[in-house]
Structures are given as C-alpha cells and as structure tokens.
C-alpha cells in the first residue's frame, strides 16, 4: 500500500511539473503521453524488452555462479584469499561502466558484451558478500567442529554456509537491482536490439514519449526482479 501511494505521489508530482510548464514537453512529456506511447508501441516495447530481459537473466545466472565459486575458493584457500581479496576490494574503485566500450570491441555488437557487463555488476556484490559471510563464522563454532572431527569439507558446508546465507540474500537483492543497468548500458554502447537501444533511437528521432516509455519498462523490470527475488529468499527464510 505504501509503495502504491509513493508511486501515485510521484506521478502526481510529475503531472504537476508538466501542468505548470516548468519543463517543455520535448524535455519531460506528461504521464498521459508516456502511457499512450506504451499502448501504441506495445509490440515494439515487448520485442526489445524480451531481448533486454534475456541479457539480464543470463548475466544474473552467470554472475551469481561465478561469485559463489570465487567466494568459496577464497574462503577455503588462505593463499588465494591473500591475492584475490585485495583485487576484489580494489575492483570496487573501478567504474565498470567504462568497460562497456572495451567489452563491445572484444565481443562485438551481439548479446555477449551486454551479458558480460551484467556479469561484472552482479559478480562483485555476490563474491564480496558471500566471502564476508563465510569468513564471519564464529571461531568457537569452528573449533567445536574440529574437536568433533567434522572435517574441513563438512564444516564448510554445514557450518560456514548457513552463516553466509544472510549475506548471500543481501548480495542477491543488490545484484538484481544492478543487473538491468548493466544490460542497458551495454546496449547504449552498441546494439541493434534492447530497451537501451530503443531509448537511443527514440531520443535521436525526438520521440521523447517513447524514450520515457522504454525507461518506465526498465524500471518495471527492475522492480519485478527485486520483488521476485525477495519472495524467493523469504520462502527459504534467507
């Protein structure tokens, strides 16, 4: 209910700005114009939206898998953690958005660079969050497991991973929010399909209402992914 009221309040504020003519229509179209563009271009938006959704889902799956593998490997290997930990921390200072043109040069104008861009945005939160969770297991619990002769592998699976699950949940919630951004930025740099590409084409043709319609669809996609992720994580009490 609160989210609905917040959304309605945002739309009302948007309409108020347009009504008072604080910004010209070619800069900020009215909500009705955007809604009309959504209706008139439904098939076009659905076609490009399906491409972006496929890129986002592929990047999410690959990014999460790579993040889990990397975090697990660093948690099990002090030597790997000594090398990979600082690299992982330093990577946060690098704006991954600047890599989009490089990825386009490497992988071409197909879906590969968009998926790679999404993987980069998903990988770091998952790897960092899960590694922190795995390393946050109380030392007393690890000592008890060692005394009970649980073994390193069994301790890792049955002791460390349960402590890391809340960190994994937080990382996934962040990742699904970032993932569409990665795909869209990749489409801005070079693409022939996708919502990011459609936004550029609409802007070049001064179809600002269509551009905002694509933007609304991107926001809706992000919110839907976040809601689905929340429900799945709550279902498993994470």
Image (tube, rainbow, N blue to C red):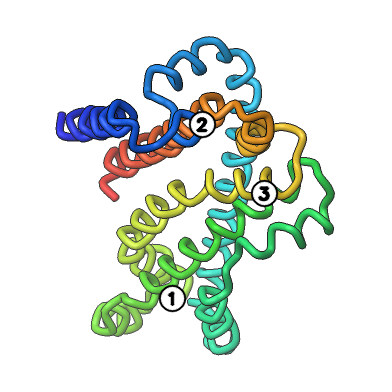
Instruction: Say whether residue 153 is visible.
Output: yes
Q: Circle 2 sits on which residue?
A: 26
Of the numbered discs in the image, which one, if any, rests on residue 151?
Answer: 1
Q: Earlier in the sequence, mark 3 or mark 2?
A: 2
Image location (x, y in percent) of residue 97: 61, 61
Q: Nearer the viewer, residue 25 or 126?
A: 25
Q: Nearer the viewer, residue 131 or 32?
A: 32
- Disc 3 crowd rating (10 Å Cα; few below 14, some 14-19, many 20+) is many
Query: Who's the residue at 58% across and 50% down the image?
Result: 182
Q: Are discs 1 and 2 less than 8 Å apart at CB?
A: no
Of the numbered discs in the image, which one, if any, rests on residue 186?
Answer: 3
Q: Are discs 3 and 2 less than 8 Å apart at CB?
A: no
Give SS at disc 2: loop
The span from disc 3 to disc 2 (Cα, nearest Å) is 26 Å
Give the vertical position of 163 relative to 140 (above or below). above
Query: Who's the residue at 44% across and 27% down the image?
Result: 29
Q: Quadrant of residue 117?
A: bottom right
- Nearer the camera: disc 3 or disc 2: 2
Give SS at disc 3: helix
Image location (x, y in percent) of residue 216: 45, 31
Q: Earlier in the sequence, mark 1 or mark 3?
A: 1
Give the vertical position of 46 relative to 104 (above or below). above
- Disc 2 crowd rating (10 Å Cα; few below 14, some 14-19, many 20+) is few
Q: Earlier in the sequence, mark 1 or mark 2?
A: 2
Query: Who's the residue at 44% across and 18% down the image?
Result: 33
The span from disc 1 to disc 2 (Cα, nearest Å) is 66 Å
Query: Who's the residue at 51% across and 73% down the image?
Result: 92
- Nearer the camera: disc 1 or disc 3: 3
Residue ranking furthest to the top: 40
């Amino acid at each position: 209910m609160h989210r609905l009221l917040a959304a309605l309040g945002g739309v009302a504020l948007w309409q108020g700005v347009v009504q008072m003519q604080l910004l010209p229509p070619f800069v900020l179209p009215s909500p009705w114009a955007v809604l009309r563009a959504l209706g008139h271009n439904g098939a076009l938006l659905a076609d490009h939206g399906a491409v972006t959704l496929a890129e986002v889902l592929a990047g999410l799956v690959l990014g999460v898998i790579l993040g889990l593998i990397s975090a697990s490997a660093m948690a099990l290997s002090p030597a790997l953690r000594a090398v990979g930990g600082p690299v992982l921390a330093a990577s946060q200072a690098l704006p991954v958005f600047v890599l989009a043109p490089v990825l386009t040069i490497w992988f071409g104008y197909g879906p590969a660079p968009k998926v790679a861009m999404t993987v980069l945005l998903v990988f770091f939160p998952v790897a960092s969050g899960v590694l922190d969770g795995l390393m946050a297991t109380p030392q007393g619990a690890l000592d008890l497991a060692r005394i009970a002769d649980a073994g390193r592998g069994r301790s890792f699976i049955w002791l460390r991973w349960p402590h890391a699950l809340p960190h994994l949940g937080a990382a996934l919630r962040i990742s699904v929010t970032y993932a569409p951004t990665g795909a869209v930025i990749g489409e801005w740099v070079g693409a022939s399909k996708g919502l990011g590409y459609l936004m550029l084409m609409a802007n070049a043709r001064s179809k600002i209402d269509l551009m905002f319609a694509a933007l609304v669809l991107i926001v809706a996609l992000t919110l839907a992914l976040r809601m689905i992720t929340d429900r799945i994580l709550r279902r498993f009490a994470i």
